[in-house]
Image (tube, rainbow, N blue to C red):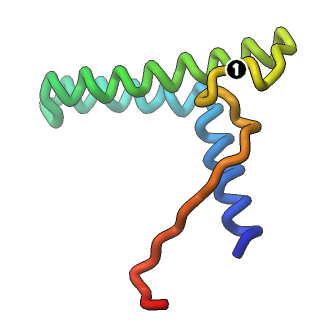
Amino acid sequence: MKFILNKLVELADQELDDERVLREDLLLLQVQYEEGDIDDDEYVEREAALMVRLREVKARRGAQDEQVPLDELPVEANVEARRRIVVETPFDE
């Protein structure tokens, strides 16, 4: 179980670090907005969140290029930091 969860975390980190995925999400968001699937407020909120994530990815890449120590990165930009995952199941113990 631990192996599977570690693989899931690894895949999630890779996706979070993929600038291409974020750009695709921005494009999809734009299409949803233009087609009227989402309103102005939701568009602005979701776009802002995606832009924050895009800046975090660029900060991590810049830090890697400049060899900035990971402890000097903002917490959200440090993908090497240990994370705790809590999995809740609907099953009784």
The residue at the far right in this view is 67
x and y, in percent, of residue 59 in the image: 65, 16
Q: Secondary structure at mark 1?
A: loop
On-image quarter of the N terminus: bottom right
Q: Quadrant of residue 35?
A: top left
Q: Quadrant of residue 13?
A: top right
Q: Quadrant of residue 67?
A: top right
Q: Is 16 positioned to the left or the right of 41 in the image?
A: right
Picture residue at 59% right of the left edge, 25% below the top: 19
Residue placed at 55% from the left, 16% from the top? 55
Left or right of 43, for residue 29? right
Q: Residue furthest top?
A: 66
| Residue 69, percent from left and from top | 83, 19
Q: Amino acid at mark 1?
A: Leu
Above/below status of 47 relative to 81: above
Disc 1: which residue? 73
Question: Could you say where residue 78 lies in the image, as x and y percent from the top left?
Answer: 69, 30
Q: Position of residue 88 (x, y in %)?
A: 47, 71
Question: Residue at position x 66%, y 53% from top?
Answer: 9
Residue density around tag 1, few if under 14, some if 14–19, many if 20 or more, within 10 Å: some
Query: Position of 7 compared to 44: left or right?
Result: right
Placement of 82 over or under 62, stated as above or below: below
